[in-house]
């Protein structure tokens, strides 16, 4: 078979994720233009990249948007509504699809983690705020009163009660180093050193975590860990690791070039499996393999 992108189900027995009810043929989409791919009950959702700024949305092979809006991230399935472009500040381009009502506009800004656990405000760089996508009401979850001027904050929930918070120190969007915390309503615990220990490089400078997915029982996380280490002449490296909820390393899985989620299969409101993209040729990032 020629080098091309094929779609197969990802069997993640260690994560206890079952195979879903909907199937589709291999090589069924144009991988070079694919941005996101999801299956929700009987809906097949494809977001195809038309250009650097525009993308087109198809549901069950039918286009639902003719304007080529930008889709910032994986569509968010929230209370039987499918939100597109949900991190954009431009409300004129924000659309939501409901199977019974079709397409309509919405006026909120939020992001959601790959476990679809909580909706958060992507533009508050000092604390984590939970957002209601319908009302846009916000509720502060974390409270870092000692945030310094050159520090920004982001995070993702690992279960409904605990958020992993990333504090980035340095210029905006160019972290010199990061620190990580587990924050619950009653406790804040730094876990930076624990992550370094999992790399077996305790002198490493952590630059970012990529939250790929969480197990169906919310007990295990698959993360991409990006770090630098002068000791081993590593300028920048990204590896995959499995952690439990205490951020203790469980093992390695999918330890390939930057695996990240491009969608998921949701049946009866539960995530059955994830679809991943990884780079198969580090010299040519357009050659991707989707599982």
Image: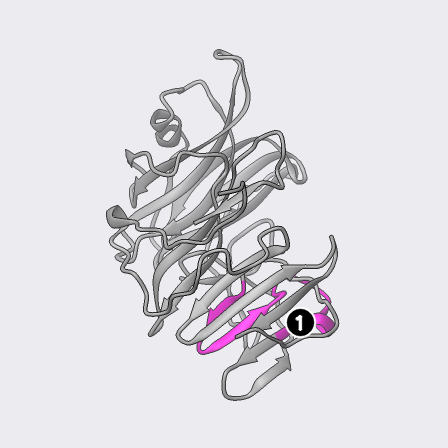
Left or right: 243 as drawn, with respect to 65: left
Q: Which residue is mark 1?
A: 94
Query: In this orientation, does residue 21 appear?
Result: yes
Q: Quadrant of the rendered structure where residue 121 is?
A: bottom right
Residue 39 in which image quadrant? bottom left
From the top left corner, tell me how far across and down residue 41 is, in percent: 39, 74
Where residue 29 sits, quadrant-wise, is bottom right
**Residue at 63% across / 65% down in the picture?**
85
- Of residues 214 and 13, the one nearer the viewer is 13
Query: Which type of secondary structure does the marked residue at label 1 adopt?
Result: loop
Of residue 231 and residue 252, the one placed in the foreground of this image is 252
The total number of labels drawn is: 1
Against 11, residue 254 (above or below) is above
Query: Does residue 244 appear to the left or right of 286 in the view shown?
Result: left
Assess whether residue 111 is covered by the magenta stretch: no
Is residue 164 something that shows in the picture?
Answer: no
Q: Position of residue 147 (x, y in %)?
A: 57, 42
Q: Which residues are magenta?
A: 75-95
Tell whether position 92 is magenta: yes
The answer to which of 93 and 258 lies nearer the viewer is 258
* Drawn side of residue 290 relative to residue 173, left or right: left
Is residue 5 placed above or below 108 in the rendered structure? above
């Amino acid at each position: 078979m020629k080098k091309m992108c094929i779609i197969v189900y990802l069997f993640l027995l260690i994560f206890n994720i079952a195979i879903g009810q909907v199937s589709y043929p291999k090589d069924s989409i144009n991988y070079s233009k694919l941005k996101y791919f999801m299956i929700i009950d009987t809906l097949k959702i494809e977001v195809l990249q038309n250009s650097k700024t525009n993308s087109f949305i198809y549901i069950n092979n039918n286009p639902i948007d003719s304007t080529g809006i930008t889709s910032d991230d994986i569509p968010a399935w929230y209370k039987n509504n499918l939100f597109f472009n949900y991190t954009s500040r431009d409300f004129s381009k924000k659309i939501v699809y409901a199977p019974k009502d079709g397409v309509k506009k919405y006026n909120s800004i939020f992001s959601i983690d790959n476990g679809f656990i909580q909706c958060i405000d992507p533009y508050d760089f000092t604390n984590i705020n939970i957002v209601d996508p319908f009302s846009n009401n916000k509720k502060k979850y974390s409270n870092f009163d000692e945030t310094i001027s050159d520090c920004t904050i982001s995070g993702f929930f690992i279960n409904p009660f605990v958020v992993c918070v990333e504090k980035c120190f340095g210029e905006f969007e160019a972290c010199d180093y990061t620190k990580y915390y587990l924050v619950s309503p009653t406790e804040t615990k730094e876990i930076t050193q624990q992550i370094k220990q999992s790399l077996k490089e305790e002198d490493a400078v952590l630059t970012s975590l990529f939250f790929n997915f969480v197990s169906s029982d919310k007990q295990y996380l698959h993360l991409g860990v990006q770090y630098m280490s002068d000791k081993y002449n590593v300028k920048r490296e990204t590896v995959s690791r499995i952690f439990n909820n205490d951020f203790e390393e469980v093992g390695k899985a999918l330890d390939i070039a930057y695996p990240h989620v491009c969608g998921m299969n949701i049946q009866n409101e539960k995530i059955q499996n994830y679809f991943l993209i990884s780079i198969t040729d580090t010299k040519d990032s357009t050659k991707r393999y989707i599982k």
